[in-house]
Image: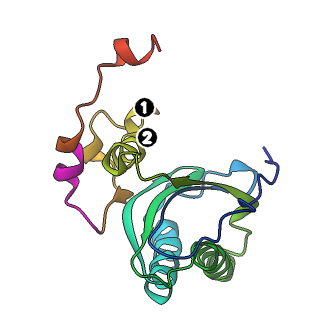
Amino acid sequence: MLTRNPGHAVSFDYLGLHRYSLTFCTNYRTRFFTEKSRVDVVFEQILRSATENEFGIIAYCFMPDHLHLLVEGLSDVSNGLVFIDRAKQYSGYYFKKAFRTRLRQRYGFEHTLRDDEAMLVVARYILENPVRARLVARVQDYPFHGSLTYPLEQILDAVVMMPPSIKSRG
C-alpha cells in the first residue's frame, strides 16, 4: 500500500520546543520490524538524528510494518524538519546497506502536538498499539517499544486505558 504525500505544514517553522507524533510506513508495508536486528539498525539511526538535532524520544513503537515516534525538541534550535529528514535518510541508508532492500515509503505522517494536547495520552496510545493489534496481551510484553524520556510504567499509569468495549462504541 502506497500513501500520498500529506506534506509539511506551510505556515509552521518546525523550530524550537515542539512535540511531534510521527508515523513511517515500511516499503509496501513489508513486515520488516519483526526481527530485533532490523529494529536495532533503524533505532540506532533515529537516536543518531535525535542526538544531532537535540530531540528527546518520548515514545516509540516498531509495529511489524510501520513505526510510531513521539519526539520533542529540547532547545530553541531543535529543527523538526531536519530531525525527520535525517532520521529517514540515516535509517534508510543503513537498512539498505545491511539488508539490501528499501526500508520505507517515501512519505510519512506527522502531527505537531498543540500545547493543550496531553503528551502522555499520545505516548500511551503509541505504546498500546501492539495490544490493539493483538500482537501481545499486555503493553509490557512487546519487545520493540519504549521511551527514552519516561519510565514505561509512568506513561501507563498517567492515563487510564478504557476497556475495549467502551473504546469500540466511540
Residue at 68% across, 81% down: 93
Q: Position of residue 124 (x, y in %)?
A: 33, 44
Is residue 77 highlighted in magenta?
no
Residue 75 visible (yes or no): yes
Is residue 154 highlighted in magenta?
yes
What amino acid type should be assigned to the residue bearing mark 2?
Asn
Which quarter of the picture shows residue 17? bottom left
Q: Position of residue 168 (x, y in %)?
A: 45, 15
Which quarter of the picture shows residue 163? top left
Secondary structure, magenta segment, majority class = helix
Query: SS class of the residue under badge 2?
Result: helix
> For residue 132, which numbered disc appears in the image?
1
71 up-or-down from 164: above or below: below
Identify residue for label 2.
Answer: 129
52 left or right of 90 in image: left
Q: Which residues are magenta?
A: 149-156
Residue 26 visible (yes or no): no
CB atoms of marks 1 and 2 within 8 Å: yes
Crowding near the residue tagged with mark 1, few <14, some 14–19, many ≥20 C-alpha atoms within 10 Å: some
Crowding near the residue tagged with mark 2, few <14, some 14–19, many ≥20 C-alpha atoms within 10 Å: some
102 up-or-down from 68: above or below: below
> For residue 12, which numbered disc appears in the image?
none
What amino acid type should be assigned to the residue bearing mark 1?
Arg
108 left or right of 164 in image: right
Image quarter of the N terminus = top right
Give the camera-side residue of 50 and 95: 50
